[in-house]
Amino acid sequence: MEQKQENKVKIPSLDELAEAGVHLGHRSNKRAPEMEPYISGLKSTIHIIDLEKTAQKLEQALDFLLEKISKGATVLFVGTKPAAKDTIKKYAEENNIPYINQHWLGGTLTNFSSILRLIENLNKMNQEKEQEKWEKYTKKERLQMDREIERLEKMVGGIKNLNKKPEVIYLIDLQKEKTAIKEAKRCKIPVIAMVDTNSNPNLVDWPIPANDDAIKSIELITKKILEAVKIGQQNFVKNSVKE
């Protein structure tokens, strides 16, 4: 489905990408050979990412995401490394997007029924607490239940509104999120990812060559991903009204 021009996300200029440090890769001794096509050179001992390739791959990923969201797909944001977790949480929560920023639970996709049970338990406990149904319990029992809520929030708090498997995953750092990538592949869920010079871009469907360690770089790319999600959601609502 071809998107109208006004629906396309504006791609950052090469200067904007450079200002955010998107071009700064890892040391040359950590280079993944598969990233060679996306490296423009070497500065001191640091590989430099070709920002023209970044802009090109970003545009392709955004077009794909926009089309999927326009058809009603759900995207899951994933970023558990220290540099990514705050950005992922901030933009996901502000826009009601499911996210994982603490720890990827094994089986999140491949054993989703078990994850759903955890989500249902968390939502039920929160609801009972809000409705003051805990008054019949002792202070010690209520404390234990609060601790259980806290435990479940860390495990599935970011996806507590997810009632089915996501159709797309956006993640940061292939090295950190290996389990998520493996599960997505098994479940045939396409993955969009920021890929630094130390990772194999062939592991994901829509790689975006970019510095995945700098907060500014992560924030810039994530903002663009979010723009595509918002436009796609607007398109879905418009299409639903027409039908």
Image: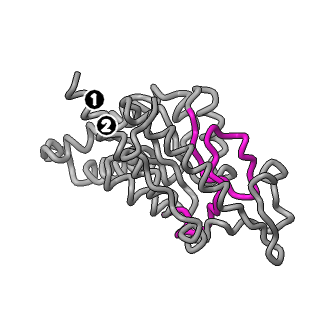
Location of mark 2 (residue): 235
**Viewport quadrant of the C terminus:** top left
Q: Could you tell me if the residues under marks 1 and 2 are in contact, i.e. CB atoms within 8 Å?
A: yes
Eyeballing the image, is 210 above or below 145?
A: below
Going by the numbered disc 2, the residue's amino acid type is Asn
How far apart are the two marked residues, 1 and 2, measured between alpha carbons?
6 Å
Q: Position of residue 95 (x, y in %)?
A: 32, 51
Q: Position of residue 83 (x, y in %)?
A: 55, 65
Q: Is residue 152 visible from the viewing direction of this image?
A: no
Any magenta on residue 196?
Answer: yes
Residues in magenta, as a range = 190-219
Location of mark 1 (residue): 239
Mark 2: few, some, or many residues within 10 Å (few <14, many ≥20)?
A: some
Q: Is residue 125 visible from the viewing direction of this image?
A: yes
- Furthest residue in direction front, as rendered: 5
Q: Disc 2 on helix, strand or loop?
A: helix
Mark 1: few, some, or many residues within 10 Å (few <14, many ≥20)?
A: few
